[in-house]
Amino acid sequence: MIMKLSICTDVFAELSYTETLDKVKSLGIDAVEMTAGGWGARTHCPTKELLEDDGKLAAYKAELEKRGMEIAALNTSCNQLWPCELGKEYSDSMYDCVVLAGKLGVKKIVCMSGLPAGNEHDTTPNWITSSVTMTAYMQPTVEYQWKTTIAWWKEFTVHCKKHGIEQVAIEEFPCQMVYNPETLWTLRNAVDPIIGINLDPSHLIALGADPIASARALKGAIYHLHGKDARIERGLAQINGLPEWKAVTEVADRTWNYVAVGCGKDLQWWKEFFSVCRMMGYNGYVSLEMEDLTMSTEAGVLTSIDALKQTISL
């Protein structure tokens, strides 16, 4: 297989399932990544309905087949390790997503690692990113979180294999246990090589990392790619640094923003990124994830598709 373009369909949340497939096809793309669990809208993939009704499932598959389209992956991103009722719902939805993937013949899911609370009595997820100097509470917290995370993933990967999943692509995402190559390897080495990364360069850019260098550090473990860009906003990041808590809608005041592909890193950079990913063994789908709030959805999608078609390594 060569690198091919797909699209995360949440960007077309206002369209129905069939309207979305027609829209994607009109853009010259034959594959979709759809949200089937987690915190996404699941507008185009009603997981519960499809699992409960074989007729609806057959009709769902037929709409893809008659357009010559396929599902690149099912997405079930969330924080399933949040110790509350919502966290349990997220976890259950991930298990359901895997069952649906098996029925659809989809071999890859995209998700996140999850982030537990600080200890068994805590209810608020804690993302520790500073130097662990206050050992009285930081080090035990990190140890507890990894123990909890690894235990959940050992059970979940058994479920994945049972339903024919071959690759679990974990997105390296802020406020999750896996947020860079090092933490991905920590989880993979402790659990199972069915776990790899959904390498989304935008998150690494926002952390100040170099996604091209990151790709080299992930040889053999890149299972999926998101075509998504980010821009460090000059004049703001230099003052306040990269950590950013403001809402993503406050684009004018943030130190970094998600942007259409090519509006953060230039096309030469993207060519090198895809080239290195291919050298590291990845030749699968590149899913456009458009979350640029500095322009209209249509403009962002078209800008990104144009950039990706010029830069993907065929």
Image (cartoon, rainbow, N blue to C red):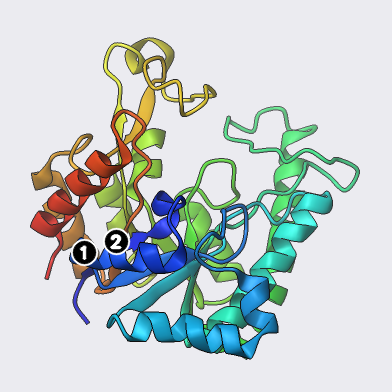
Describe the element under mark 2 as helix, strand or loop: helix
Frontmost residue, 22 versus 245: 22
Residue 149 appears at what percent x and percent y?
A: 69, 59
Frontmost residue, 283 versus 19: 19
Crowding at mark 1 (Cα within 10 Å: few <14, some 14-19, many 20+): few
Describe the element under mark 1 as helix, strand or loop: helix
Q: Is residue 153 left or right of residue 307?
A: right
Q: Which label was assigned to residue 23?
A: 2
Q: Which of the image's four quarters has the C terminus?
A: bottom left
- Contact flag, marks 1 and 2 (Cβ < 8 Å): yes
Crowding at mark 2 (Cα within 10 Å: few <14, some 14-19, many 20+): some
Q: Which label was assigned to residue 26?
A: 1
Residue found at x 13% / y 58%: 309
Residue found at x 70% / y 58%: 90
Hey, what amino acid is under mark 2?
Answer: Lys
Residue 39 appears at what percent x and percent y?
A: 61, 52
Hey, what amino acid is under mark 1?
Answer: Ser
Q: Is residue 303 left or right of residue 34?
A: left
Choose top left, top right, bottom left or bottom right for residue 41.
bottom right
Number of numbered discs overlaid on the protein picture: 2
Residue found at x 63% / y 36%: 128
